[in-house]
Amino acid sequence: MVGLATVFGAGGGTSSYADIEQTDVIVLWGSNARSAHPIFFHHVLQGVRNGAKLYVVDPRRTESAQWADLWLGLDVGTDIALAHTVAREIIHAGLVRRDFVERATSGFAEYAASVEEWTLERGSAVTGVPADAIRELAHAYARAPRAQMCWTLGITEHHNGVDNVLALINLALLCGHVGRPGSGLNPLRGQNNVQGGGDMGALPNKLPGFQDVEDDVARAKFDAVWGTPVPPRNGWNLTQMFEAMGRGDLRTLYVIGENPAQSEADGAHAEHLLGSLDFLVVQDIFLTKTAGLADVVLPGSASWCEGEGTVTNSERRVQRVRKALNPPGDARDDCAIIVELARRMGRDWSYPTMEHVWDELRSLSPMHAGMSYARLEALGGIQWPCFSEDTLEPPYLHGRLWADDPASRGRLAPFSVVRDEPPVEATDAQYPLRLTTGRRLDSYNTGVQSRGFDSPLRTGETVDVSPEDAASLGVADGETVRIVSRRGEVTAPVRVDEGLRPGLVFMTMHFPDEVDVNRLTIDATDPKSGTAEFKAAAVRIERLPVPAWT
Amino acid sequence: MTETTGLTVRRSVELTIDGAPVTVPEGTTLLQACRSRGTEVPTLCYGDTITPKNACRVCMVEVEGSRTLVPSCSRKAEPGMKVRTDTERTRHSRRLVLELLGSSVDLSLTANVARWNEAYGADPARFGPDAATVAQPVKRDNALYVRDYAKCILCYQCVDACGEQWQQTFAIATAGRGFGAHIATEYETPLPDSACVYCGNCIQVCPTGALMFTSEHDMRAAGTWDESRQSRTDTICPYCGVGCALTLHVQDDRIVKVTSPSDHSVTHGNLCIKGRFGFQHVQND
Amino acid sequence: MDLKIASASATDAERQAVDALLGPPPEAARGAERDERSHRVARGGASLRALRHLMLPVLHAVNDRVGWLSRGAINYVSQRLDVAPAEVYGVATFYALFSTAERPARQVHVCVDLACRAAGGHTEADLPPGAHASPCLGLCERAPALMVLEAGERPTRAVEAPVPRPRVAEVVAGGACGVEPAVAAAAPQTPDDSLVLLHRVGRVAPTLAGYLSSGGYEALRRAHEIGPAAVVDEVTASGLVGRGGAAFPTGRKWAAVASQPATPHHLVCNADESEPGTFKDRVLIEGDPFALLESMTIAAWATGCGHGWVYLRGEYPRAEATLRAAIDEARAAGWLGPRIGPAGQSFDVEIVRGGGAYICGEETAIFNSIEGHRGEPRNKPPFPVEVGLFGKPTVVNNVETLVNVPAIVSGGGAAYAGWGTEGSRGRKLFCLSGAVARPGVYEVAFGATLRHLIDLAGGMRAGATMRAVLLGGAAGGFGGPDDLARPLTRAAARAAGTTLGSGVVLVLDESVDLVDQMMRIADFFHDESCGQCVPCRVGTVRQREALARLVAARGAAPDARAADVALLRELAQVMRDASICGLGQTAPNAIDSAISRLGVLA
């Protein structure tokens, strides 16, 4: 969200799912949408059916990659190198969309100079992708009348995730693939309301509607309606909070619907910090591992089916969630818990219904102003921005950049000069394998929601290795092995995956109670977004000793 | 006459249905045209998210000048067409097709069939007790859904939803030929050994109850399935950020099955395994 | 696509059979060796999926090599064509010549169809163990017949006819098929210079030299001179209509395709001759293959097609070998290829071998089959001239229809129209089989009487008395001695409530069990229904059940049978009215005529 906000001012995908169906080239970069965003992939498939070419950039030859006209299997963490090489090739082949670059962007010369060293040869050497494949991607993306760039955690879960995003945005700027029907940039959100959380101001530097905390005018509006001054300084992101816990500056934590004890990289460290807090409150629908550490647990409700409200999806579509079930036992609606807490603190927040909360938000966030509950209902959700109840904006963002009139073009979109940086942890003789992580189709995050249903696809956690590595390690499919990183070790059965190349292994974090993969991952985070480098750790695999007869 | 929708201009087509003049946008099927004026044309294999295969042949209407009856679900309206929905020929055809299907397939859970049998005087029992049927045991090879092909009318909707038209997993296809044609995985392998990804999009489009949530199947077997006590609530899937619309079917404060609205721009009625089946964590047991 | 392939792997032989056809797996494709490059790039997508039309050839390749389609083989085909295993399985199980169960490499298919059982051949009930019952093998002029398919590194396909019962047992036990008689035997009229369609059959060797020395390719030269539009005009003027049964005006079809802006245009020659009692296309291809190639080249010229497919039924090994040799020779001499003649026409022809499915002779089912799908008919409209093979404008013509074209182009449409009658212009081939003295293919002008045809065939076989005649095959209808004076025109056929169909004239004498013939027709449609639409899929079953009951109740009081008689009539109506394609629509015809005209149940 940070990358897009930096360049365009709004932290949201610029296209709609419908645009994916009407385009000429689709690039999935660091996204295995077939497994992780299956219904988004339906739109990709419709696009392919309508004639779009599909390019997939991913270290693994994933299910998504198997649909691609061309798959590019880069080394983990070399996305910027690849993007820069693509950019240089576009520039040198004379494929830059000059009219767009001149009218709508800034900083091209500096950017072009910064990628000049990224020849195909160098790019190929750094990323591992053959030069001809990089060239083909560059030419296909640049020559396409319309093109979509889509990414997800494969781009963002790196210590330099924001720079990765900026490097991809640069490519769209170079080719004018933004702000038009069928062309755009699509970050696929990992959770059903990541986008909505950002929209609502659940970011340390934002108020609802992406208004800056440090903007006095914006803040004054909120002060007036909320009847209390909003602190005029940015808060901490999750990483900074853990750092503050480490320093002892943060002693009390209220966690709602998160399981950081298991979802954070270097889990052992995270668990230790959470355990040393003075006071930890967890509001959740499960007694998660984090809740197990808490001083107070507030049983909440499942917001998607036990309460009312809205969520925002990856195409900025705000949609209603509705109550279908009563929360069990003493569990309460999350909003009711917060209102009750406020009451005990001496504030009477009288929201008779969630719609009243929403209407207050609409009065404060211009991009949501036109989204009444009635309209959300009638239209099957509305994409932001929606400034008034009488209008709808185009389904893609930043069309302004194409305006003939400079005044209506607004702020120019800046190219970003970013540097290629390898993953924090290199592989070496002791830890020769690159561990990367991701999701499987039938599971989700730490498995809190997904483990309950009886999926026929579920095999439990495995360590996926290439056939070559399995052979050289002398391990068989299904054999339990020990996976060791500098931070910890776990055991898991081997699954041989032809989609992996030698040196690359894959695990998920779906089964932390059985195999806590975050004992292996590295706690290196992006300073701009606070996202951890889940995608690149160095590990080794050891065979377990054959158990002796007893 | 023209109608402008967005940037595309659709011409109008004038035709008559049962003698009455009707004007519809170009590209409208005869079935849509009939429905638009409130004329019921029965159909079993038509689903609103799948391009019709027109395999059931219940929806046949008479078009002047056509040697045979025509399937209203897929035939587009043409200027000057004279369509008759209720003639001796169409009634005969519908009655016989209902009898042919009813005598070979278990239509007990198929909507409207009893009413249509009555309306058209169809008697599926007339072929006698020895008439060949597709009766066979229920296939129950996974925890999430059952396949009861004794109820399959071979409408192809599950195949198209799993394959070409939506999911493109192609775990199932029509296999065999003639009366032996059936829906199958490769080598009739059980689902857990097949390519099935349990998106359940086949269940959503199945018009006869041949494909069914295990929860519904078992409740029906136990006699506890009661749609009059069920609510349907639209909400959004709690998993990834795509924002799929779910319709939760709830009986006695428990989710008994999940569908997706077929007119939703994100899903078009389709879900993945998590959205379709991943609700166990909120069940009040 | 993201295939999920079960663990079963192809054997070396299966893999070799596939690779021999497709070449080794391309770089970094699935199934290829894992190397440094394949760890970094892979191609797939549309380019891989574009191979689907090789499905049927690949399945044949495996079947020819090992005799059946194992799970491992289907998995490998699936990987190579990027088509899911379930889809491959669905296609494989559609065709009667394939098996997804293990079986011996050698298969003997014994024809149990109308002409063969009338000639004393086997029925389903009395086949020797190990033999397969086969629908009509198209060898009716020398019935009864069988076909032997033997898989292996050098697969063989052979037929033998006539094959008396003791010989059947010998062949099933492993005996080799005898040598096939020369094709001349199947065209007893030749040599006869007045023949237009058959004049080379059995008389001129099926070689390019023979063809060129007997006036071959003169018509193509003329077509190139007068240009495509004039060719269409001549064909239109000739009054030529389709000979496959539907009788659609060929000129109109060609004009429609020629005028379509969508490209490319395709030409499909329907040589899936499977109507029981029909064998004329086989004789034409075996006896004069270049005539078909020249005709297709002219058709392609007239309609703007760059590529032609001959969809040839899988049970015609000699026709396939003859045509394949002819194509090779024509290509080598520049009569097929990128620059044909001074006009520089670009056109080539490919043979697609059918897998044993009558329905694939339906003009849209043939598209699905060529495209690598199950051979199920498509709904019409859209018609093939607009949306046909691979979704493009397509000319589909039957073999016989096409071979009329050189005479039309050379002699002019008007002259051609001089043959025949007002409503039925031109020349027509008839397939005479059964109780006539000299069975075979006969060419006459439309309007000849049935009696004339039987006289041409030497009259009734010695000692035989005509009891019935089946006109038009299983999709046609029965007539009796009363019909001998009837002229063979479409109008007359229509008036008599029957059809000329594909030109079947199966003459049945008193020795033939007509009830058995009728039941065989019911079985045939039951077996050959594709299963897509309800009226045909279930209707053919109910029709057979009702007939069986009526046969069992022969001699019972009419009242006891009235319900089933009414049922048959009602079934016939719904099948005609509501089936998707001609198979279902015509499935009740012959049965209806057997009951109403011949009184077989009386």
Image (tube, grey):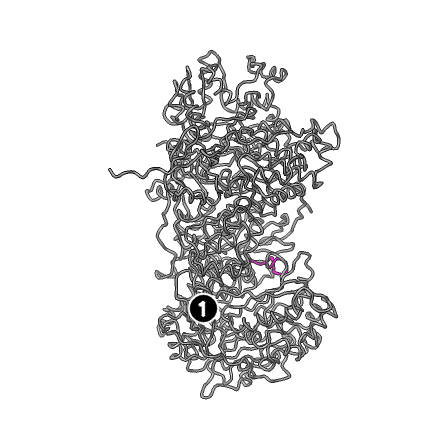
Outermost residue toward the left in this view: A550
From the viewer's perspective, is residue B12 above or below residue A214? below
Whole-percent x and y of residue A292?
A: 37, 23
Whole-percent x and y of residue A244?
A: 49, 17
Q: On the rendered structure, is A326 left or right of A36? A: left
Q: Name the one closer to the observer, C571 or A29.
A: A29
Chain part drawn in magenta = C378-388
Q: How many marks?
A: 1
Whole-percent x and y of residue C446?
A: 61, 78
From the viewer's perspective, is residue B203 above or below residue B64? above
Outermost residue toward the top in this view: A346
Whole-percent x and y of residue A14?
A: 62, 33
Helix, strand or loop for disc 1 = helix
Is residue C578 visible in the rendered image? The answer is: no
From the viewer's perspective, is residue C534 above or below residue B271? below
Outermost residue toward the bottom in this view: C462
In which quadrant will I find the C terminus of chain A?
top left
Q: Name the one closer to the observer, C465 or A440.
A: A440
Mark 1: few, some, or many residues within 10 Å (few <14, many ≥20)? Answer: many
From the viewer's perspective, is residue C135 above or below residue A352? below
Magenta highlight on residue C422? no
Magenta highlight on residue C379? yes
Is residue C12 visible in the rendered image? The answer is: yes
Residue labelled with disc 1:
C524
Q: Chain of mark 1?
A: C
The amino acid type of the residue labelled 1 equals: Phe
